[in-house]
Amino acid sequence: MHNLSTVVKFEIVRSLKKKSFWLLSLAFPLMIAAVFAVIYFSNQATSQAGEELSKQKFSLAVTDESGIVKPEVLKALSAKQLDTKEEGVALVKEGKLDGFIFIPKDIGANEVQIYGKDVGIFDNNRYASVTQWLLSQSIDSKFNPSELAVVQQKVKTEVTTYQDGVERDAIKEAILPGVFLILLYLLITTFGGQMLASTTEEKENRVIEMILTTVRAKTLIVGKIVSMVILGFLQMAIVLIPVIVGYALLHTQLALPTIDLSELPVDWVRIGIGFVIFVLSFLLLTGLLVAIGAATPTAKEANSFFGVIMLLMFGPLYAVTLFVSSPDAGIVQFLSYFPFTAPIPLLLRNAVGNLELYQALISMVILAVSSMLVMMVAVRAFRYGALEYSRKLTLKEIFAKE
């Protein structure tokens, strides 16, 4: 194993030199940046267009059978009142009137009908906006400020919940432990393919034969696994740092919610459990993908197994409400203890606070043992399959006695 550090260094440096590594690492931050840019410029354009629209003057008439509209509101818009709907529609058709609003007697059961001169897809919204303003201004004057807040659904509420006599905010408590669920998802989606190809690359180009003349198969595969773990955490940092920096610098301009970290409850037990489950889950996945790559002759064949692994890992997300509302259900317990499906249920339940300490400890032991066993299988698969170029190894061959 004296060549282990050499293998680790070689794998890391080689991966860092690949354009695909940086492309995959930066794809998520760049995508987030692109979305933020679109939101920012869209908001700017919408705001500017809205200001220009508010400055536009156009002729307007109203027929109000409901009696809701106040004369002073009509006067503020320089709008005139017509006796019949037919008269207003005719004036619009003849081009003598820009907009006409017909308000039926029962506004709750019937639609308010609006007719106007076509001034473009965006600018046509001015008629609906004016109608809404006309009605709201007429109604608002009938209520005092408190009643108006209820009618406009602007009543502010503050909910305080308690558990065993202690104030608790379940949503805030879930944020810090829940970060590990997001990190695992990002790590697998951005780095999974590279882990799968790490053991098939040399086999496909037949370089493995020359490598194994100087390095033992066990040393090589252990070095690959260690390098994959290091690169995985490095890629995670590359993904997160630009997002965090971008949020810190631009959240005001993009009208994003401000997160005050000092207000977040810090439960070091749940955070520690989340971290351990995250690390063990990543090690388990790394071992699985490396073992698959070692047992198959080409990356194409290895990819056929990748979908099965992803289904096992992320399939439980379809039952997310079950993990939150019914943690004692049999299916939840099974998915939480079965190692290949456990990562998502455990991280999710730990985030929402329904993962008991003894359940967490049992699950972590299962994940740790499973990770070690999978790593051992990966080593054996590589030892026997490193020079297999045309067929997949069978389980019998992997576990055969030497």
Image (cartoon, rainbow, N blue to C red):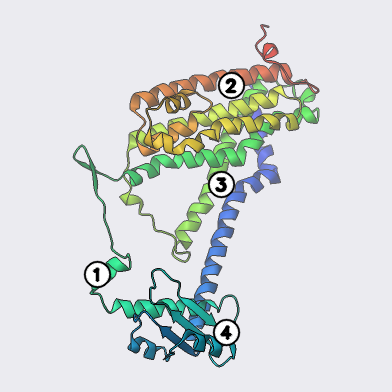
Relative horizontal placement of residue 63, taking residue 219 as reference (left or right): left
**What x and y, as percent, mark residue 42?**
55, 68
Q: In which quarter of the image is the C terminus?
A: top right
Mark on residue 117? 4
Q: What element carries label 3?
A: helix
Question: Which residue is identified by label 1?
Answer: 147
Question: Which residue is identified by label 2?
Answer: 375
Quick one: label 2 or label 3, which is nearer the N terminus? Answer: 3
User: Which amino acid does the dot numbered 1 rest on?
Assistant: Glu
Residue drawn at the location 54% of the way across and 26% of the way down:
340
User: Which amino acid does the dot numbered 2 rest on?
Assistant: Met
Quick one: label 3 or label 4, which is nearer the N terminus? Answer: 4
Quick one: label 1 or label 4, which is nearer the N terminus? Answer: 4
Residue drawn at the location 48% of the way across and 86% of the way down:
55
The crowd level at tag 3 (other Cα within 10 Å; few <14, some 14-19, many 20+) is some
Q: Is mark 4 on a helix, strand or loop?
A: loop
Quick one: label 4 or label 2, which is nearer the N terminus? Answer: 4
Residues 357 and 352: in front is: 352
